[in-house]
Amino acid sequence: MLTERLDFPGPHGKLAAKLDAPDATPRAYGVFAHCFTCSKDVLAANRICAGLADQGIAMLRFDFAGLGASEGKFADTNFSSNVEDLVAAADFLRAKFAAPRLLIGHSLGGTAVLAAAARIPEASAVATIASPSDPHYVVDKLFAEHLDTIAQLGEARVRLAGRNFNIRKHFVDDASGHRLHDKIANLGRALLVMHAPGDDTVDTANATRIFSIAQHPKSFVSLEGIDHLVTSKEDAAYVANVIGAWSARYLDQPGDGATA
């Protein structure tokens, strides 16, 4: 496996990325969207993409604007900008290598993948890992005690995963403006929903909702005993192996990604 450092333009400036590619010619390309306030180098992104590269799928993982090594200020971003970053990543792959046929998102990254898929026509397979069914879940789950401050002052300092972030009112308003029911129902791609029943960060009811709304072809895999961030090396390898095996029949089909 080879890992190449790359960058490409996004709405808020240059986005830092890494491409994990097999030694031989890739049989397909994919994009990985990391979890909320994480980065392309978080263990799950690193290990899952490496596992897929070993199966012949070249995976582009990148830092959303304002995170990791990407340009921009996190306080200026929101769910909509994450979707735009994803589309920019797909555009970059299409122009530089080949259009992505596989889209994977972890936690809120998976929610963003569901929202962005319609704008990436070549994608034939979409996988979510521990993802909310709606971006406003993050607001309700993580910012509930700060909402009054955000409403009154326009922003609040919120501690997430051991770091402090400025969360502004536009983030809350933007999350409230997205309703993904129609996008999930009309996804038009094969969908794999992966979630742990014991996930204490994103309740499994989110996965149930995504799966129930989506049309076939769709699959559900229970990540029994796996933590939300997929921190175990063995768990990440399992997730990569499942995604690789599941996606093979869709990645090898000709066409622009649309399914009947």
Image (tube, rainbow, N blue to C red):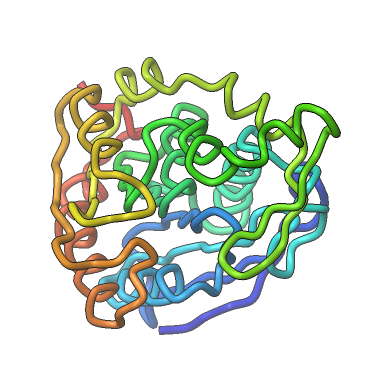
Most extreme residue toward the right, as rendered?
153
Q: Which of 145 and 107 is in front in this view?
A: 145
Q: What is the x, y in percent for residue 215?
A: 19, 23
Q: From what the image shows, is residue 188 above or below residue 225? A: above
Residue 9 visible to an observer of this rendering: no
Q: Which of 56 and 189 is in front in this view?
A: 189
Q: In which quarter of the image is the C terminus?
A: top left
Q: Which of 12 and 120 is in front in this view?
A: 12
Q: What is the x, y in percent for residue 45?
A: 44, 68
Residue 223 visible to an observer of this rendering: yes
Q: Which residue is found at the position 44% from the left and 76% from the top?
A: 43
Looking at the image, residue 211 sits to the left or right of residue 185; the answer is left
Q: Which residue is found at the position 71% from the left and 31% from the top?
A: 148
Looking at the image, residue 8 sits to the left or right of residue 87; the answer is right
Q: From what the image shows, is residue 195 above or below residue 25? A: above
Q: From what the image shows, is residue 127 above or below residue 83? A: below
Q: Which of 138 and 28 is in front in this view?
A: 138
